[in-house]
Image (tube, grey):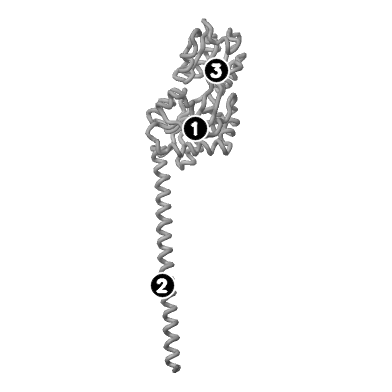
């Protein structure tokens, strides 16, 4: 073989090798471009999904949380620092998880909150998930279970839970509450007296216009602290199971709210909020 012939074959081999490397490099580059395109597409889809959830659960651009004052299950104003309340804290955490500003909307009574949920004036509420309410709004699983009981003022003729339903007894309830709905069927001899708000009920108890007041024990203990000589009766006549409520028609956001509920029950946020608000007569609901 001549020197020229050997050199020629070597050049061909090196050229083929270079062509192969170029081909591989081109394939690698194309692969990177495809991967980058897929990653970009995935990122856009993920962001779009987040934006869609925000649009569904917080259509105003803020998470409007319906709360009512005077109970540690919902909202307790503070003279210094942030308000307290399980509902207030859960709303704040839900807004952070959703990635939108938090807007607490505080009402004087729970009936106003329920109306606001039904009309879409608020985006979430934290309330008793009764069967009647479930017809008008959608609930996630319960995060809190609370005993229902009675508060009696000093000198009341109602001495025990067994003597509540007696002719001549005046039993107070908050207008539009689930307690009103249940006791209007369960009490047969006692008179049911409606109070518009907790402060009005307190005044009625102080003035001797009520022999007992019925609601969940979390609220009853708070009321008792404001009425000297009053006490919460032993025993209970039922339970409230509080859950996050959203307006009807936002079905695509329910899984997000259910996952959030499971997370805050498991990571201690519900228990911590209960402790910070001084919530009594309640416990974290069993996980579902």
Earlier-in-chain disc, 2 versus 3: 2
The Cα–Cα distance between marks 2 and 3, rounded to whole angstroms, is: 80 Å
Q: Position of residue 182 (x, y in %)?
A: 47, 17
Q: Residue at x 50, y 7 (%)?
A: 189
The answer to which of 265 and 276 lies nearer the viewer is 265
Q: Is residue 127 above or below residue 100?
A: above
- What SS does tag 2 mark? helix
Q: Is residue 56 above or below residue 209?
A: below
Q: Can you identify the residue that label 3 sits on?
A: 237
Q: Position of residue 33 (x, y in %)?
A: 41, 62
- Please tell me the numbered disc located at residue 141: 1
Earlier-in-chain disc, 1 versus 3: 1
**Most extreme residue toward the front, as rendered?**
1
Count of labels shown? Answer: 3
The Cα–Cα distance between marks 2 and 1, rounded to whole angstroms, is: 58 Å
The Cα–Cα distance between marks 1 and 3, rounded to whole angstroms, is: 22 Å
Please state, as top left, top right, bottom left or bottom right, where the N terminus lies in the image.
Answer: bottom left
- Along the horizontal axis of the image, is 59 left or right of 147? left
- Please tell me the numbered disc located at residue 116: none
Q: Can you identify the residue that label 2 sits on?
A: 23
Q: Residue at x 42, y 64 (%)?
A: 31
Q: Can residue 58 be seen by looking at this rendering?
A: no
Corner quadrant of residue 16: bottom left
Circles 1, 3 touching at the beta carbon (< 8 Å)? no
Circles 2, 1 touching at the beta carbon (< 8 Å)? no
Q: Is residue 14 above or below residue 85?
A: below
- What SS does tag 1 mark? loop
Corner quadrant of residue 248: top left
């Amino acid at each position: 073989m001549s020197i020229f012939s050997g050199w020629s074959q070597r050049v061909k081999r090196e050229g083929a090798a270079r062509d192969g490397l170029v081909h591989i490099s081109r394939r690698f580059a194309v692969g990177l471009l495809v991967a980058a395109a897929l990653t970009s597409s995935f990122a856009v889809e993920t962001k779009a999904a987040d934006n869609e959830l925000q649009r569904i659960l917080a259509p105003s651009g803020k998470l409007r949380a319906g709360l009512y004052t005077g109970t540690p299950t919902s909202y307790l104003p503070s003279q210094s620092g942030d308000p307290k309340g399980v509902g207030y804290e859960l709303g704040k955490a839900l807004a952070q998880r959703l990635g939108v500003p938090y807007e607490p909307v505080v009402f004087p009574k729970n009936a106003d909150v329920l109306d606001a949920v039904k009309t879409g004036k608020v985006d979430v509420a934290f309330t008793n998930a009764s069967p009647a309410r479930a017809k008008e709004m959608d609930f996630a699983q319960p995060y809190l279970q609370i005993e229902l009981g009675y508060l009696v003022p000093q000198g009341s003729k109602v001495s025990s839970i067994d003597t509540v339903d007696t002719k001549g007894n005046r039993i107070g309830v908050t207008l539009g509450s689930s307690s009103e709905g249940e006791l209007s069927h369960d009490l047969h001899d006692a008179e049911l007296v409606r109070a518009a708000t907790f402060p009005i009920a307190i005044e009625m108890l102080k003035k001797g216009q009520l022999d007992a007041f019925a609601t969940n024990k979390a609220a009853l203990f708070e009321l008792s602290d404001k009425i000297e000589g009053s006490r919460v009766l032993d025993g209970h006549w039922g339970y409230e199971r509080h859950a996050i409520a959203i307006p009807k028609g936002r079905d695509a956001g329910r899984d997000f709210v259910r996952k959030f509920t499971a997370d805050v029950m498991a990571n201690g946020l519900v228990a911590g909020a209960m402790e910070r608000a001084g919530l009594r007569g309640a416990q974290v609901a069993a996980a579902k």
